[in-house]
Image (cartoon, rainbow, N blue to C red):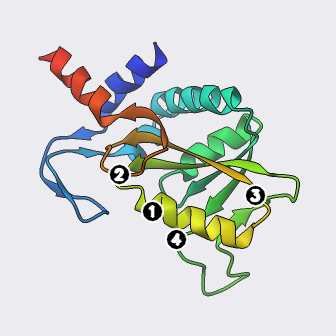
Amino acid sequence: MKKALLMDFIHKHAFIRKPVILSSGRRSDYYIDCKLVLTHPVGMRLVCDLMDEELKKRNIEVVGGVELGAVPLLGALTYRGYHTFIIRKESKNHGLRKLIEGKILKTDKRVAVIDDVITTGASLSHSITKLKSEYPHIEEIICFCIFNREEGGEGINSLITSTEFKEYLKRLN
């Protein structure tokens, strides 16, 4: 039910049908702007509820995310009791110059990492490399995304896939 509501919400508020170049460099005839979902109270609630269900199924208590896409969702998940962290694309050139913001404990052996939209999975893969480098004691990293374009990035748990969304669009016509 919530997944169907999220697809409706994405279609109405974040689905843009026009040629774009994605961060992967690939071309697409549509764009999903998940930031429009995550900055709207209804969209955020739907995503947060669905992600919370997925994390609880896997008994995950520590969740990180890729800057910038996952940051709003991490705030909502923190409010729900999860320990969260942010993986920067690059360290700042001032302050503590950290790549990972937030606290990961030595006892945190299983963590989840979230991104908003996945095309090839390259951004998430780079973030995981940074995480493993900074916290080698982590034994298992489970990856999630809100929308998976299914052009790579195998093994990523998705709230909505491109295939599901295209089927949804067909049913509308």
Label 3, on which residue?
Answer: 138
Mark-to-mark CA distance, 3 and 2: 24 Å
Give residue 109's position: percent from left, percent from top.
79, 51
Residue 110 in the figure: left or right of residue 161? right
- The image quadrant that residue 93 belongs to is bottom right
Whole-Å distance between the Cαs marked 1 and 3? 19 Å
Answer yes or no: do the residues labelled 1 and 3 have beta carbons within 8 Å?
A: no
> Residue 173, relative to residue 59: is it above or below?
above
* Tag 3 near tag 2, CB within 8 Å: no
Element type at marker 3?
Answer: loop
Rate crowding at label 1 as few (under 14), some (14 to 19) or many (20 or more) other CA atoms within 10 Å. Answer: some
Q: Position of residue 73 (x, y in %)?
A: 57, 43
Rounded to the nearest angstrom, the CA distance separating label 4 from label 3 is 20 Å
Nearer to us of marks 4 and 1 is 1
Mark 1 lies on a secondary structure that is helix
In 3D space, how far apart are the residues under numbered discs 2 and 1 (Cα atoms)? 11 Å
Q: Is 151 left or right of 84, judged from the image as shown?
A: left
Q: Quadrant of residue 127?
A: bottom right
In the rendering, which numbered label is found on residue 102? none
Give the labeled residue for mark 2: 152
2 vs 4, front mark: 2
Q: Dot 3 surroundings within 10 Å: few (below 14), some, or many (20 or more)?
A: some
Which is more N-terminal, label 1 or label 4?
4
The numbered dot on residue 89 is 4
Residue identified by numbered label 1 = 123
Residue at screen point 28% across, 31% down: 163
Q: Is residue 12 visible?
A: no
